[in-house]
Image (cartoon, rainbow, N blue to C red):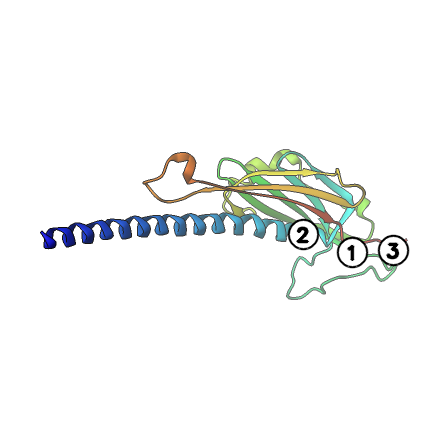
Amino acid sequence: MELLIVSVLFFGLLTLVSVFVVRGKRLAVKTESFASVQREAIKLARAIGEDFNRATDKQHNYNNDTVMFLSSKPVDQATEPVLEFDAATGQVLWKQWVAYYLHEPEKVVKRFNKPLPTPVSDPLFATGAWDMTEFPTLALSPNEGRAMAKGITEFAVSRALGPNMWEFRIVAEGEVPLGNMSKEDKKVRVEIETGVRLGVKEIP
């Protein structure tokens, strides 16, 4: 009788431990899934912030899933100075077009860049920009652009924050890779809303 009681207690304890182990594993996997999705959203927000530090408000275009702007970043960082000025005017030289585009079918935001035919000190004279309708086709080519973040389901741009300020809304989503969870419980979602100020100012 005593042996039976001990056995029942032992198996009861073993079952309880198993439940805690399963729940602990599920929590750990869900936490890692959330962290992975969060990293993608933060990585994209950081990249946009760095690029906008080198942008001008005088040349840009944007819509629901795309933003394009003129940048002073060097085309070849190994041979060009970090920031270059026109010897005649003292103004910043603008060297390339930069764009971010959300390719919704793959939930990937790609970054594109295109050197200007000739760097200019007046942004209004910059040429060679993309047509905004080109990006859906460009995104399909593995040789065009660079994937900056995956799992992105929303990439919205607005100018609601005022002059020289841009607002970005980034939504990243993923799923917990476990079979013993409901579809709703598997969903992981991160939203980031951030304001970015343009960093480069022209000399009056």
- Write down the residue under mark 1: 93
What is the secondary structure assignment of the residue under circle 2? helix
Report how far apart the C-alphas of labels 2 and 1 lie in the structure. Answer: 20 Å
Please rate how many residues cluster around mark 1, counting C-alpha atoms within 10 Å: few if below 14, some from 14 to 19, many from 20: many
Judge whether residue 19 can be spotted in this image: yes
- Write down the residue under mark 3: 203
- Write down the residue under mark 2: 49
**Whether residue 31 is situated above or below residue 129 in the rendered picture:** below
Residue 78 falls in which quadrant of the image? bottom right
Count of numbered circles in the view: 3
Please rate how many residues cluster around mark 2, counting C-alpha atoms within 10 Å: few if below 14, some from 14 to 19, many from 20: many
- The reply, left or right, for residue 139 in relation to residue 129 is left
| Amino acid tagged 2 | Gly
What is the secondary structure assignment of the residue under circle 3? loop
Q: Residue at x 57, y 39 (%)?
A: 102
Q: Residue at x 14, y 51 (%)?
A: 5
**Mark 2 vs 1: CB contact within 8 A:** no
Judge whether residue 127 can be spotted in this image: no
